[in-house]
Image (tube, rainbow, N blue to C red):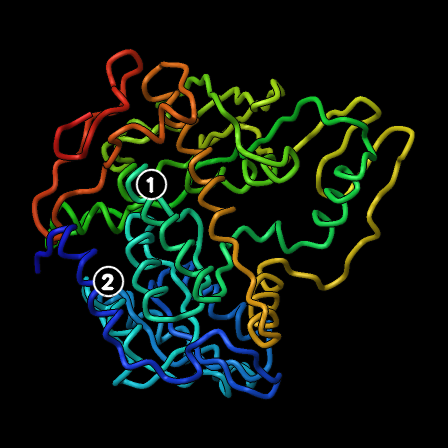
Amino acid sequence: MSISRRTFVEASAVAAASLALPKSAFAMGRKNADPIRIGVIGCGGRGTGAVRDAVAASDNVFITALGDLFPDRLAQARTGFAKTAGENPRFAAAYKVTEETCFSGFDAYLKVLATDCDLVILASPPAFRSAHLSAAVRAGKHVFAEKPVAVDVATALEAIAAADLSVSKGLGWVAGTQRRHDPRYIETIKRIHDGAIGEVITGQVYWNQGGLWSNARKPEWSDTEFQLRNWLYYTWASGDHIVEQHVHNIDVANWVFGGHPVKATAMGGRQTRTDAIYGHIFDHFAVEYEYADGRRLTSYCRQQDGTTSKVAEAFQGTKGRSNGYDTIEGPNAWKHAPLQGMNPYVEEHRDLVASIRAGKPLNEGHQIVESNLTAILGREAAYTGQTLTWDDLIKSSLSILPKEWALGTLPVPAVPTPGETTLMRTFNEGW
């Protein structure tokens, strides 16, 4: 099967706009007793995990449709859900998927959107996120969209347009940045904004850890299938790990600083994950971000086995410091009380559903696109070896997705080389 990117996006718009929407798909107020039907697009680990979290979060929600590019992943998800249903009566009561509401292929997302679901979980590889978002919003669906929502400038602009449309339609959009739904972060950052550490001067964010999974190539897999089944390791598919993973910490920094940076200077490279199975992404980044008022944020992330792990944030002010999470140090010292049984991965789904039922849907679209672009800015500063401004990035022609979606031949771009790789590039023109 082959479909051009232009056709893919146009099909998303036309088909989604022409769907006969059930009355409940619109962003109206709901009573708590009203059911919410959830469709799932992307049935890998994130999608299946989000399904379980959504069911655990709220009463009277039902999983009604599943879609995935690969039939075997769809089948694997259904087997896992059947097992969960056999062990968990609550999940069994919520799981309403039938053979007729399971879809595979590049157009599976449109078939899910054509069902009577009210809300969709978007958890396919990030390369597809902006097109799926556009289609979902046009179809009048509320959205839980895993981060990141973009891998380059072109997809970020598409996501911004989807965010604008979702706001105008009164639709909910929660972004998978679960720290925004954690009472500890919420209270601590509120205190920071209220002056608990004085004026925030600088900050540091970290996501340093070991390596992640990979899937050995099977003889029957095409280039594209192999890359999509190992999507972490291709910038076009994941955005690289600074975008795909470290965006969580960068989002916290933008939350604390009250906006996005205007400039980035960075370095990074590929030292330990050099085998071809790891695609062409970097395994470490170090970025200095500068905000409009001159404040600086330093950002560190790596995925290297045998190294010290650290996933954290830290902020210094004129009167103290904070980890942004649960502690204030200094004259206004404070620590959040321990929370028992609170799971932010569940809370984000609970908050979304509660807001829909209240008739005031949460919408985090612009917020996540801004943090997503911040991560892309740092990546591109490292890839190119240039100090880049926010305007440099937004005005660039950076568009790194393949021009055609097909399970066939797909060359792997070269590993980015600082001083040679340019910001003005596309997938097919090389790096």
Side (left or right) of 11 relative to 202: left
Q: Residue at x 29, y 27 (%)?
A: 274
Residue sitting nearer the eye, 135 or 320: 135
How far from the left and from the top, in percent, is residue 314? 68, 30
Residue type pointed to by label 1:
Val
Residue type pointed to by label 2:
Ala
Does dot 2 land on a helix, a strand or a loop? helix
How far from the left and from the top, in percent, is residue 179? 61, 49
How far from the left and from the top, in percent, is residue 384? 32, 18
Residue sitting nearer the eye, 216 or 90: 90
* Label 1 Cα neighbours within 10 Å, binned few <14 / some 14-19 / many ≥20: many
Residue 188 position by quadrant: top right
Side (left or right) of 109 relative to 342: left
Q: Residue at x 60, y 72 (%)?
A: 57
Quadrant, the N terminus: bottom left
Q: Nearer the viewer, mark 2 or mark 1?
A: 2
Residue designated by label 2: 13
Q: Residue at x 62, y 63 (%)?
A: 347
Residue sitting nearer the eye, 186 or 357: 357
Residue 233 position by quadrant: top left
How far from the left and from the top, in percent, is residue 185? 70, 47
In the figure, 88 relative to 424: above or below? below
- N-terminal of the pair, mark 2 or mark 1, is 2
Residue designated by label 1: 151
Q: Residue at x 32, y 86 (%)?
A: 98
In the figure, 25 relative to 244: above or below? below
**Which numbered marker is on residue 295?**
none
